[in-house]
Amino acid sequence: MAGVDPIAVATQIYTGLQMIVARESDLPRAPVIITVGKMSGGVRENIIPEEMTMAGTIRTLDSEMQKDVHEKIKRTATKIAESMGATAEVTIDIKTPVTYNDPDLYRKWCRPSKKPTGQENTVRPNG
């Protein structure tokens, strides 16, 4: 009986995670970044490992988008693994809350200032 190669499974999951960003996200409304920064498994170069681990970061600017992306990541990883005869366990630790800059507060604190030449130097938000 043929074995399941977790390296092949992990690479397919990686590609699937990138497709969440590229094809399943409303980036103009709420940007999202999924980064897999670490993949590890195995003990020797000539032995197929029993398991692989992947670790990375997820960045969003909207809490609803964050919840949606977390569900898509779980679904993508588990379904890809299942389709290849493997299983995937997804753990997402929310370490930092979504960053939100209140536009009114931003305008209050970023008032125009004067350059040494006496010309106005206005700070304008992007967008």
Image: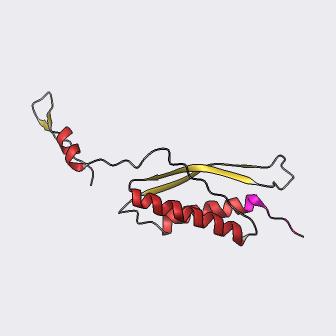
Image quadrant where residue 119 sits:
top left
Image quadrant where residue 87 sits:
bottom right
Where is residue 69? Give x, y as percent: 49, 61
Quarter that holds the C terminus: bottom left
Name the colour scheme.
secondary structure
Q: Is residue 119 above or below residue 98?
A: above
Q: Of residues 63 and 36, which is closer to you in this image? A: 63
Q: Is residue 18 above or below residue 113?
A: below
Q: Is residue 88 at all visible to an observer of this figure?
A: yes
Where is residue 48? Give x, y as percent: 83, 56
Q: Is residue 110 left or right of residue 72?
A: left
Where is residue 7? Give x, y as percent: 74, 58
Q: Residue at x 39, y 53 (%)?
A: 61
Q: Is residue 114 above or below residue 51?
A: above
Q: Of residues 94 and 39, which is closer to you in this image? A: 94
Q: Residue furthest top?
A: 116
Where is residue 23? Give x, y as percent: 49, 69
Q: Is residue 7 magenta?
A: yes
Q: Residue at x 76, y 69 (%)?
A: 85
Q: Is residue 110 at all visible to an observer of this figure?
A: no
Q: Which residues are magenta?
A: 2-8
Image quadrant where residue 113 sits:
top left
Q: Is residue 76 left or right of residue 107?
A: right
